[in-house]
Amino acid sequence: MIELQNVAMSYGGGDLFSEISLKLAPGSFHFLTGPSGAGKTTLLKLCYAELMPSAGHVSFMGRDVRTMGRDDIAALRGRIGVVHQDCQFLDHLSVAENVALPLTVARRPLDARELMELLGWVGLKAQADALPPQLSGGERQRAALARAVIMSPDVLLADEPTGNLDWDMSLRLLTLLVELNRMGKTVLIATHDLNLIRAAKQQVSARVLRIANRRLQLAGADL
């Protein structure tokens, strides 16, 4: 579905990472770990064509993103949901309006009943009319997840989605991500939280990858 082949990324004349190859197969579940500054966020951005590699190839459904025009890349991103580390909302719009924003931008019809079902799935039905500043950290992350999946993407990429949450809320968010995977979605989560990874491996067959020494490695069984 998404494939990186011998990818390198350089900043300021030095390699952030190089010779990275990764294949995200349909329905797979991956964790991406590594120290701060190793390039986890950059790797996610390569996966949804926010960045282009300095070398190597990134392909989606067999198509090299370098050969895609702007409209093609926009269509690609419609099939990839992203939960950013610092989820941003439009504070003058309600939670429901923020979650529905990808549909609005794509000029796709909004089914109010399906929107409320989605908000109910993430436990935010009662907050549908609230404004983002009224939400807790955990509620904001769940709203961000709802916004990421409202276009029914094939792939979900999450960058440190539990970084600012307590353990109970982290597990609640993890449960939602595992449910998405069981629905057939491909999931890639960048995280430094090894306890979260251990909890996930009790629920789903997850592959754990680590960026270290500018390379991508399969993490050991110690996780």
Image (cartoon, rainbow, N blue to C red):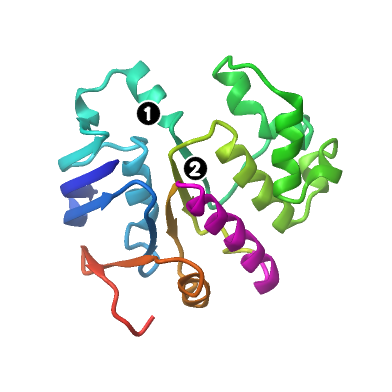
Question: Residue farthest to the front?
Answer: 183
Q: In this rendering, is residue 36 above or below 220?
A: above
Q: Nearer the viewer, residue 183 or 177?
A: 183
Which quadrant holds the N terminus?
Answer: top left
In this picture, residue 125 sits left or right of residue 22: right
Question: Which mark, by number, is residue 82?
Answer: 2
Q: Nearer the viewer, residue 175 or 127?
A: 175
Q: Which residue lies at the image location 50% right of the left edge and 54% below the top edge?
A: 182
In this picture, residue 31 sits left or right of residue 18: right
Question: Which mark, by number, is residue 76?
Answer: 1
Q: Give whichever of discs 2 and 1 has the lower sequence position.
A: 1
Residue extent of the magenta highlight: 165-184
Kindly identify the amino acid type of the residue bearing the numbered disc 2.
Answer: Val
Q: Which residue lies at the image location 71% right of the left edge and 57% below the top edge?
A: 137
Locate residue 16: give its quadrant: bottom left
Whether residue 125 is in magenta: the answer is: no
Which quadrant holds the C terminus?
Answer: bottom left
- Residue 184 location in percent, x, y? 45, 47
Kindly identify the amino acid type of the residue bearing the numbered disc 1.
Answer: Leu
